[in-house]
């Protein structure tokens, strides 16, 4: 069931709606990084509006240029580490569209459901990001105590978190938040295994950018399989 759902999700990656969500997420991430750089340039210009005078040196006029070029290097360095997680978070805002695309393709007899509001989607995304970051920071203690098992701890933890998030996203579109939580708890083992399948590609650059899309699609299939018994 789990692998079948995953393979169906992979097969649908060329779907224009999947591609639209992916490129919007990447585009908004790039725009955010450009905005960050513009903000740093403004801050540097404000800080260096008055020339710096050093004893024995005199007026320093090159400080603004140095900081400007240095800030570019900082933003480029940050983009290497932030591109994937930020793109994933932004992409998560549009995952309702992915779930709808899956249902249109594989479950056309279903009655359409109203899309999740932007406010609710943003709240769930921020909540999930906070939980994901907090849990991974706390688990560093376990990494230090059991370094030989760090990889397995990483996959087990993030598999649980991803499975929890994506299954609930798929289920609550159809049965509401409360019933979705109850169904998730009733099938926690199966959902955890499916979440681990999503967590493994997080270790591979570029591939991990599409994980939110594959996760939403896979768990939409999994939800319908479970709900049909």
Image (tube, rainbow, N blue to C red):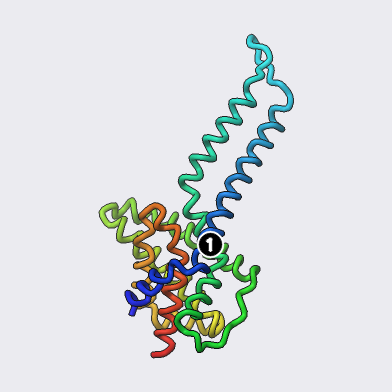
For the N terminus, which image quadrant? bottom left
The residue closer to the viewer here, 73 or 183, is: 73
**What x and y, as percent, mark residue 209?**
45, 58
- Relative to 127, does residue 148 appear above or below in the rendering? above
Residue 119, position in %: x, y?
65, 68
Instruction: Say if 188 sits above or below 201 in the image.
Output: below
Residue placed furthest toward the left: 148
Q: Can you tell which quarter of the image residue 66 is in?
A: top right
Quadrant holding the C terminus: bottom left
Residue ID at (46%, 47%) = 81
Residue 17 point in image, percent of width and height: 52, 69
**Residue 130 appears anywhere in the view:** no
Q: Is residue 80 above or below residue 158?
A: above
> Which residue is at a point 56% across and 52% down the rendered structure image?
29
Percent x, y for residue 82? 49, 49
Horizontal relation, residue 226 to residue 25: left or right: left
Identify the element where label 1 is drawn.
Answer: helix
Q: Residue at x 48, y 83 (%)?
A: 182
Name the residue beneath numbered marker 1. Answer: 91
Q: For this rendering, which residue is in front, 113 or 145?
A: 113
The residue under the point 55% across, 31% down is 70
Res. 63 image quadrant:
top right
């Amino acid at each position: 069931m789990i692998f079948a759902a995953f393979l169906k999700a992979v097969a649908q990656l060329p779907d224009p709606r999947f591609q639209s969500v992916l490129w919007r997420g990447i585009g908004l991430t790039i725009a955010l990084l450009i905005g960050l750089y513009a903000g740093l340039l403004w801050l540097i210009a404000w800080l260096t509006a008055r020339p710096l005078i050093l004893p024995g040196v005199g007026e320093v006029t090159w400080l603004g240029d140095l900081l400007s070029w240095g800030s570019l290097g900082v933003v480029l360095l940050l983009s290497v580490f932030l591109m994937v997680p930020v793109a994933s978070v932004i992409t998560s805002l549009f995952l309702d569209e992915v779930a709808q695309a899956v249902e249109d393709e594989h479950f056309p007899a279903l009655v359409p459901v109203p899309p999740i509001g932007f406010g609710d989607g943003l709240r769930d995304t921020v909540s999930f990001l906070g939980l994901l970051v907090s849990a991974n920071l706390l688990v560093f203690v376990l990494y230090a105590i059991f370094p030989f098992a760090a990889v397995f701890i990483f996959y087990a933890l993030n598999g649980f978190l991803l499975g929890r998030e994506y299954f609930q996203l798929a289920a609550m579109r159809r049965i509401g938040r409360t019933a979705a939580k109850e169904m998730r708890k009733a099938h926690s083992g199966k959902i955890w295994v499916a979440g681990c399948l999503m967590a493994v590609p997080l270790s591979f650059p570029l591939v991990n950018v599409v994980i939110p899309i594959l996760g939403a699609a896979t768990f939409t299939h999994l939800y319908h399989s479970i709900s049909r018994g």
